[in-house]
Amino acid sequence: MSDDRREVASADETAALIERMAAAVWAGRRPGSPFYLVGVRTRGAALAERLGQELSHIGGDTIAVGAVDITLYRDDLGEGRRWPVLRGTEIPFAVDEAEIILVDDVLFTGRTIRAAMNAICDLGRPGRIRLAVLVDRGHRELPIEPEVVGLKLATGRHDRVRVRLRPLDPADEIVHVGADPAHGPTSPERRPSP
């Protein structure tokens, strides 16, 4: 990669984005329905925890948070040379008839979200699924659009968006890394490594 690295959001700016996302999630909820957050592992799960904390401050009650591992639901599972690493799905509540806020750090092609919805629907029939993402970088391959977005970021298809979130990382940060034109486009990853 080249040195074409640009900080998109600092720690304070990222925290402010998460606060605004929580307010938007709360404003769009259906009162009276069970209401849960499910984060896509790895940083989507960390973001869901952070949103859950913010929502608890807004609503006054603890919001249950789960995590989904999409590894076995990926449509490119047989293409890799390495064995997949399973991190486990942990959803400690019934999804039937519940309002599920599906949370991820970066929305790219939409394939990760499709896999996550399939994994959740294998556990039951949610009443509603809403999508909340910290960064929407475009380049969709499936007709999936988020309801709540922290920020929209124009990127090249072969660029990278690196999100760092506490407590997984030392500090919050969103960075845009441009593809190195001297080496041509790198093979596109469906998800950045944790």
Image: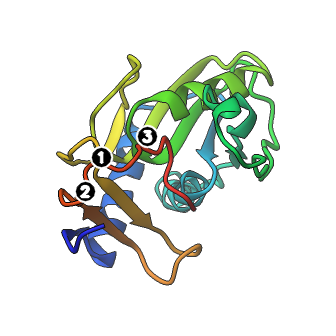
Chain-order first, disc 3 or disc 2: 3
Horizontal placement of 64 versus 194: left or right? right
Q: Quadrant of the C terminus?
A: bottom right
Q: Nearer the viewer, mark 3 or mark 2?
A: 2
Callout 1 secondary element: loop
Q: Residue at x 32, y 66 (%)?
A: 174
Q: CA distance from mark 1 to mark 2?
A: 6 Å
Instruction: Give the label on residue 47, or none.
Output: none
From what the image shows, is residue 64 above or below residue 98?
below
The residue singled out by tag 2 in the image is 179
| Residue located beneath label 3 in the image | 132
Looking at this view, is 118 or 108 the one in front?
Answer: 108
Q: Is residue 105 left or right of residue 85?
A: left
Q: CA distance from mark 1 to mark 3?
A: 23 Å
Q: Nearer the viewer, mark 1 or mark 3?
A: 1
Quarter occupied by residue 173: bottom left
